[in-house]
Image: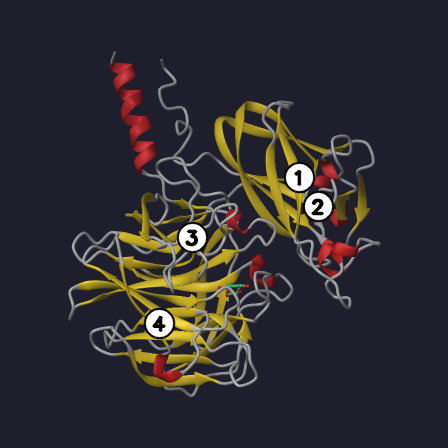
């Protein structure tokens, strides 16, 4: 009896401690459904201090105009769905599901006592370029449509919002479209009651950037934005200034060149002023152009050096974040390289100066050309990160779909691998492996059921609409169970 009680306490404690952030994984809400809120933004509930995340709701067959979903959390890791905060209205001019309802941001207005949701409101050919406004007395909504307008008579496409923690004033950030007369990003101050922008604070001229967000430190403002390549990722940049009015620095890459910011597009950022540390998060989208509704969220800590005005988004497969203290730490895993794995069929190790041990596994294909790793497990669900190179992006062989750097080329964007644990072919895990660049290795995590002791993890190729090729595999990293050994073993004593 006592043992049972002790185990219960242990198991519950393990659940309560969950606060790992796993960028690029499939995130699930507390009902077990996929976290479905893209190009979003955070707002804090005035009364409870809870975080609310708002984003574009996308499902297969309705990847635009699906409305705005909302989730709440105390730790930025465990999310509870509150359904749609803004529901599309049939035949409505601006918020029907034939419209674009993109990049929502919610800010509380002290003056009106309501939450104000702003977004990029458009038709399906992006010809209106408006800012939508809807309000609600409750943070989770439902929000009521108010208007769709041109800020100070200007075009407004990708929308961002930012509140200065020193002055308390809020600002809208918006790219003003792709036309030659546009191609700027505007930073404009909202009026006190957040019902319209009242003054242009700064115009980032003619860089042709989009997806803007601003991070404020003690000393600086950093504006992060992407280049314009639609739902294909590119190298996100930052610009720095002492004042919002400028002067602003030249743009610089926020992550290693050619990683395309770890296959993400910027859009939001957050400053956690914790009791021990101030931490800045980059909150981005890892779009999946082949199935937009399956796009992932990538949230990563930002490293800032005020001495030289630099800022870097650093990749971590998993990090543990404490939103109260502001502290975070990367989780350490155990690495298994392809060079020491077992290869079958046509899969083979090819020399690659950028790979682990100078060799990368290639020729991974379908059900018979595979790579098998033997790894240690702890008898529960564990995160495993798969480090791959996918060179379709720059054209490879004679595949017409894989040559974007050629005239009339398009991107293939991802391959899919099958992952089988301990030979259990009934439960194939699907691993999406986005385009990298030649010589660039990036990772994607999967939560896998590992038994205590030795396990095999076998990687093959699945059909991605073009081919059965898996991406080249460099290594995998197996992480310890979240919350310790008992997590996932809830009720194991029954
Ligand atoms: C960019 C924008 C998104 C969306 C797509 C459409 O990625 O940032 O908000 O408008 O283009 O292609």
The answer to whether the beta carbon of the residue marked 1 is less than 8 Å from any atom of ligand 1 is no
User: Which of disc 4 and disc 3 is earlier in sequence?
Assistant: 3
User: Mark 2 and mark 1: span between their CA atoms?
Assistant: 7 Å
User: Mark 4 and mark 1: span between their CA atoms?
Assistant: 41 Å
Camera-side residue of 409 and 145:
145
What is the x, y in percent for residue 261? 56, 62
Evaluate if marks 2 and 1 touch, with contact meaning CB atoms under 8 Å apart: yes
User: Which of disc 3 and disc 2 is earlier in sequence?
Assistant: 3
Q: Nearer the viewer, mark 4 or mark 2?
A: 2
User: Which of disc 1 and disc 2 is earlier in sequence?
Assistant: 1
User: Mark 4 and mark 2: span between their CA atoms?
Assistant: 39 Å
- The residue drawn where x is 68% and y is 57% is 440
Label 3: element kind: loop
Residue situated furthest bottom in the rendering: 247
Label 2: element kind: loop
- Residue 162's place in the image compared with 403, above or below, is below
Camera-side residue of 180 and 403:
180
Q: Nearer the viewer, mark 3 or mark 1?
A: 3
How was the colour assigned to the protein in this rendering?
secondary structure
Picture disc at residue 417: 1
Quadrant in which the C terminus is drawn = top left
Q: Nearer the viewer, mark 2 or mark 3?
A: 3
Picture disc at residue 66: 3
- Residue 34's place in the image compared with 91, above or below, is above
User: Mark 3 and mark 1: span between their CA atoms?
Assistant: 29 Å
Instruction: Residue under label 2, please give it.
Output: 471
Picture disc at residue 217: 4
Specify whether residue 377 is in view: yes
């Amino acid at each position: 009896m006592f043992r049972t009680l002790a185990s219960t306490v242990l198991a519950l404690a393990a659940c309560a401690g969950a606060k790992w952030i796993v960028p690029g994984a499939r995130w699930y809400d507390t009902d077990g459904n996929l976290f479905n809120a893209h190009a979003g933004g955070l707002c804090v509930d005035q009364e409870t201090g809870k975080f609310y995340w708002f984003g574009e709701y996308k499902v297969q067959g309705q990847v635009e105009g699906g409305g705005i979903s909302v989730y709440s959390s105390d730790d930025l890791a465990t999310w509870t769905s509150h359904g749609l905060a803004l529901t599309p209205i049939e035949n409505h001019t601006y918020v029907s599901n034939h419209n674009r309802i993109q990049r929502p941001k919610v800010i509380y207005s002290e003056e009106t006592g309501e939450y104000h949701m702003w977004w990029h409101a458009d038709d399906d050919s992006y010809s209106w370029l408006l800012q939508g406004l809807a309000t609600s007395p409750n943070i989770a909504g439902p929000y009521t449509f108010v208007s769709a307008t041109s800020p100070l008579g200007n075009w407004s496409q990708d929308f961002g919002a930012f509140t200065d923690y020193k002055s308390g004033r809020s600002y809208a950030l918006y790219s003003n479209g792709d036309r030659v007369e546009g191609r700027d990003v505007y930073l404009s101050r909202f009026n006190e009651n957040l019902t319209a922008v009242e003054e242009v604070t700064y115009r980032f001229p003619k860089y042709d950037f989009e997806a803007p967000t601003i991070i404020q430190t003690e000393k600086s403002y950093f504006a992060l934005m992407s280049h314009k390549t639609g739902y294909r990722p590119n190298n996100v940049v930052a610009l720095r200034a002492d004042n919002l009015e400028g002067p602003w620095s030249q743009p610089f890459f926020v992550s290693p060149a050619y990683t395309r910011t770890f296959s993400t597009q910027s859009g939001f950022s957050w400053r956690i002023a914790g009791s021990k540390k101030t931490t800045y998060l980059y909150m981005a989208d890892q779009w999946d152009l082949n199935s937009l509704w399956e796009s992932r969220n990538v949230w990563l800590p930002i490293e800032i050096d005020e001495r030289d005005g630099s800022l870097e988004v650093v990749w971590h497969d998993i990090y543990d974040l404490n939103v109260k203290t502001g502290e975070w730490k990367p989780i350490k895993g155990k690495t298994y390289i392809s060079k020491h794995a077992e290869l079958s069929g046509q899969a083979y190790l090819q020399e690659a100066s950028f790979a682990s041990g100078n060799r990368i596994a290639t020729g991974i294909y379908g059900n018979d050309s595979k790579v098998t790793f033997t790894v240690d497990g702890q008898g529960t669900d564990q995160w495993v990160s798969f480090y791959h190179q996918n060179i379709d992006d720059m054209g490879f062989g004679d595949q017409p779909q894989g040559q974007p750097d050629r005239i009339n080329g398009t991107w293939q964007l991802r391959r899919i691998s099958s992952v089988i644990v301990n030979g259990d072919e009934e439960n194939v895990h699907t691993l999406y492996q986005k385009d990298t660049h030649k010589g660039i290795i990036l990772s994607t995590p999967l939560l896998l059921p590992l038994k205590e002791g030795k396990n095999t993890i076998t990687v093959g190729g699945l059909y991605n609409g073009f081919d059965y090729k898996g991406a080249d595999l460099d290594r995998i990293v197996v992480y310890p169970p979240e919350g310790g050994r008992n997590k996932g073993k809830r009720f194991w004593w029954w």
